[in-house]
Image: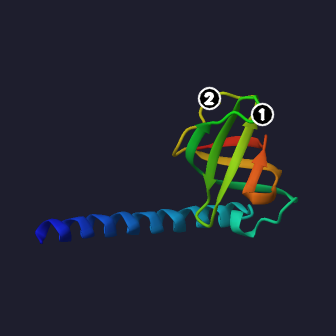
Amino acid sequence: MGERSRLRTSLSRLASHDREEARELRKESRDSGVVSIADAVERERVTLQGKISTVTLRPRGGVPALEAELYDGSDSLTLVFLGRRRIAGVAPGVAMRVQGRFGTDKVMFNPRYELRP
């Protein structure tokens, strides 16, 4: 019984931390004047910012492609860098600002990017 309540407490603490981090990311986006991923309009040029949650090397049509998932507290966006196997500094947990055309299915190809402190 004690084991179960410890697990429940740990999970509750993690969920609380995730909600707090999402709130902070949304606030940072609002304060910097960029659009949130949830509010971005398909096929429009937008500036977004958030944190990288995952980075994956996934070939597309025989061409290497680095995929990174950007999370801003409201939603996630997949960034696809065609022809790249890696990008220095792009790793999970890194803050990033990107500019590009917001594509269908929440994908942005070859965005301009800036690593944030």
Quadrant of the rendered image containing residue 50: bottom right
* Position of 52 relative to 63 (above/below): below
Q: Nearer the viewer, residue 50 or 102?
A: 102
Query: For the residue labelled by badge 2, is the local secondary structure a helix, a strand or a loop?
Result: loop
Q: Position of residue 55 (x, y in %)?
A: 58, 40
Would residue 98 appear left or right of 19 to someone viewing this image?
A: right
Q: Quadrant of the C terminus?
A: top right
Q: Nearer the viewer, mark 2 or mark 1?
A: 1
| N-terminal label among 2 and 1 | 1
Would residue 13 appear left or right of 39 to someone viewing this image?
A: left
Other-residue count near label 1 (Cα within 10 Å), few / some / many at <14 / 14–19 / ≥20: few
Quadrant of the rendered image containing residue 73: bottom right
Name the residue located 69 percent from the left edge and 60 percent from the top edge. Answer: 32
Q: Quadrant of the N terminus?
A: bottom left
Name the residue located 53 percent from the left edge and 43 percent from the top edge. Answer: 92
* Position of 23 relative to 99 (above/below): below
Query: For the residue labelled by badge 1, is the local secondary structure a helix, a strand or a loop?
Result: loop
Q: Amino acid at mark 2?
A: Ala
Label 1 near label 2: C-beta < 8 Å?
no
**In the image, which disc is placed on residue 90?**
none
Q: Position of residue 21 (x, y in %)?
A: 48, 62
Residue for badge 2: 88
Q: Amino acid at mark 1?
A: Gly
* Position of 30 relative to 60 (above/below): below
Name the residue located 63 percent from the left edge and 44 percent from the top edge. Answer: 68
Q: Nearer the viewer, residue 36 or 80?
A: 80
Residue for badge 1: 61
Separation of disc 2 and disc 1 at Cα? 24 Å
